[in-house]
């Protein structure tokens, strides 16, 4: 049984991308065939399939984004693609979470989601990007050579191995678990194709590991162009850390660099490297993440800056980007380059598993926490185990700031709702900044005022609005028009967390969603809620 037949309309003519696409198509069809024979997949089979899809999202999407970076595609061409990738991964994560909650997952719905993704993404977005990639590859290839990526293969025939891994083994129908295992092995084998593209690229490229604190560490691979540019033999580069080949003050920017990669999909901006003669070299760096052997690593591309001025001793004097992670938040947008540099140098990343307490009520504040990825809840609880969620904090939002800026103990506890990465801006440099920067002090006052009005609006809703009105208001607060022109809300957390935040019980929230769905006012798919008609939703008055 076939959901999608592999055909020329799905081909991008980029070898490694097509091989990964075809693997997904074949696995989707194998899943459909399995469901045609039996009513449903077992829980273990669903877990296997979701595990593959998670690996696929991480490996395939990092492959595409590495290609876009290696070919020098502009940010405007890659941003939407990156957002689409992040959405796919979030939807798969939601399905895995749902399976963990009740052990049941609608396999037919999963197939519909994958079928729609294959058509919309591969035939739509990927073909658009592929045209730009082929044009860039053709421009970089010598006359008469085909413009394909991953065609050279000094790493042992990864593509042939991948094809063999997904081919049926012997006679008879293989077990579904074996099919998934073979496709997983094929997907991992394709990583060699990405390494091959980096190795043969003309742009200096380094692949760098991340340590436990998410800081760039050892250089795992360096291409010949990087060795030539840095004046260091490839074998020697493989024994060094990224900080060893950069100017002495660049390591202080690592937390911000990684934050940008996690939040925006890439870091792009000026950087300084150590040159052949020991002098600093100005470069334009582009950094993205890669999935390699199941781990996140960084691909660092270095482009020399022509006619660059001599390296400056102070970070504040170097070229800066118009924005960084800190400057995206209103609290820090008013800072000048020197002030922002000082805060960035003092900041550090925190990686938290799901359920980790960031701080308890009455703990002394450590600073301001900026969410880079994941989610955090702020809540209060009582001795009987009751809990009230006061706020759900999402990426690019801050928490703990009132306590840090006033020096008072925390009034609530903070706990990660998912695997989460935070940027902690310590309290001491913030206090110093408050005393000497009037614009920052004004920004703090404005921020505190906005928080006050938001909490007043919440209290008003709890006291004067029905549960249905609170749910509708919450949906519209999180609604945005998506790429297809449809108004869509993304629920910020699990339903039980949202219920607590809206002062409802989980069953009441579920009944309200069901009521709105039956009335044709919303269409729910996991955390994604489509709103066909905003006016009808606002005016809904049940009998």
Image: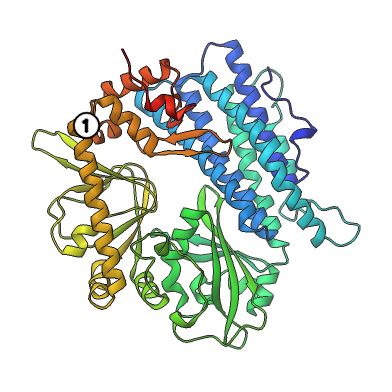
Q: Residue at x 19, y 39 (%)?
A: 459
> Within the image, what quadrant is residue 462 found in?
top left
Residue extending furthest right? 144
Q: Quadrant of the C terminus?
A: top left
> Within the image, what quadrant is residue 284 found in?
bottom right
Seen in the image, is 415 located left or right of residue 269? left
Query: Is the residue 535 above or below the residue 293 in the image?
Result: above
Secondary structure at badge 1 equals loop
Callout 1 crowding tier (Cα within 10 Å): few <14, some 14–19, many ≥20: some
Percent position of residue 194, x then y: 66, 53
Residue extending furthest left? 383
* Viewer can see residue 294: yes
> Within the image, what quadrant is residue 461 found in?
top left
Percent position of residue 85, x then y: 56, 43
* Viewer can see residue 158: no
Seen in the image, is 179 located left or right of residue 348? right
Q: How many marks?
A: 1
Query: Is the residue 53 above or below the residue 206 in the image?
Result: above
Q: Residue at x 53, y 11 (%)?
A: 39
Front residue of 115/19: it is 115
* Residue for badge 1: 503
Front residue of 378/538: it is 538
């Amino acid at each position: 049984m076939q959901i999608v037949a592999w055909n020329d309309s799905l081909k991008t003519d980029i070898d490694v991308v097509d091989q990964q696409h075809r693997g997904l198509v074949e696995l989707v069809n194998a899943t459909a065939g399995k469901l045609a024979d039996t009513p449903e997949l077992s829980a273990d089979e669903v877990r296997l399939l979701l595990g593959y899809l998670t690996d696929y999202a991480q490996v395939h999407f990092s492959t595409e984004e590495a290609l876009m970076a290696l070919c020098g595609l502009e940010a405007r061409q890659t941003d939407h693609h990156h957002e689409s990738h992040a959405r796919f991964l979030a939807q798969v994560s939601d399905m895995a979470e749902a399976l963990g909650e009740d052990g049941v997952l609608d396999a037919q719905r999963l197939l519909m989601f994958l079928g729609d993704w294959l058509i919309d993404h591969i035939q739509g977005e990927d073909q658009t990007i592929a045209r730009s990639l082929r044009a860039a590859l053709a421009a970089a290839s010598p006359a008469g050579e085909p413009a394909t990526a991953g065609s050279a293969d000094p790493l042992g025939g990864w593509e042939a191995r991948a094809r063999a891994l997904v081919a049926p083994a012997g006679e008879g129908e293989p077990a579904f678990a074996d099919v998934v295992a073979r496709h997983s092995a094929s997907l991992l084998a394709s990583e060699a194709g990405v390494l091959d593209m980096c190795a043969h690229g003309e742009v200096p490229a380094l692949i760098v590991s991340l340590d436990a604190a998410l800081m760039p560490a050892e250089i795992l691979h360096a291409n010949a162009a990087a060795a030539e540019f840095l004046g260091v033999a490839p074998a020697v580069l493989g024994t060094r850390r990224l900080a060893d080949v950069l100017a002495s003050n660049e390591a202080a920017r690592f937390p911000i660099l990684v934050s940008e990669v996690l939040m925006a999909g890439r870091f792009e901006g000026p950087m300084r490297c150590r040159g052949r003669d020991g002098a600093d070299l100005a470069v334009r760096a582009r950094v993205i993440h890669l999935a390699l052997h199941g781990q996140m690593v960084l691909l660092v591309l270095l482009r020399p800056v022509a006619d660059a001025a001599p390296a400056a001793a102070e970070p504040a004097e170097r070229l800066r980007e118009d924005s960084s992670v800190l400057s995206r938040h209103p609290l820090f947008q008013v800072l000048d380059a020197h002030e922002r540099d000082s805060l960035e140098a003092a900041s550090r990343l925190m990686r938290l598993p799901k359920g980790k307490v960031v701080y308890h009520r009455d703990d002394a504040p450590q600073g301001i926490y900026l969410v880079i990825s994941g989610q955090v809840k702020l809540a209060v609880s009582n001795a009987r185990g009751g809990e009230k969620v006061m706020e759900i904090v999402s990426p690019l939002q801050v928490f703990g700031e009132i306590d840090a800026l006033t020096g008072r103990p925390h009034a609530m506890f903070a706990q990660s709702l998912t695997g989460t990465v935070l940027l902690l801006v310590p309290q001491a440099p913030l206090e110093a900044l408050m005393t000497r920067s009037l614009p920052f002090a004004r920004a703090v006052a404005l921020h505190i005022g906005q928080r006050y009005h938001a909490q007043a609006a919440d209290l008003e809703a709890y006291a004067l609005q029905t549960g249905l009105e609170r749910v509708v208001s919450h949906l519209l607060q999180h609604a945005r028009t998506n790429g297809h022109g449809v108004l869509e809300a993304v629920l910020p957390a699990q339903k039980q967390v949202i219920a607590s935040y809206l002062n409802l019980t989980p069953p009441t929230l579920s009944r309200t969603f069901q009521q709105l769905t039956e009335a044709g006012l919303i269409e729910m798919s996991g955390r994604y809620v489509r709103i066909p008609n905003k006016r009808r939703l606002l005016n809904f008055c049940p009998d």
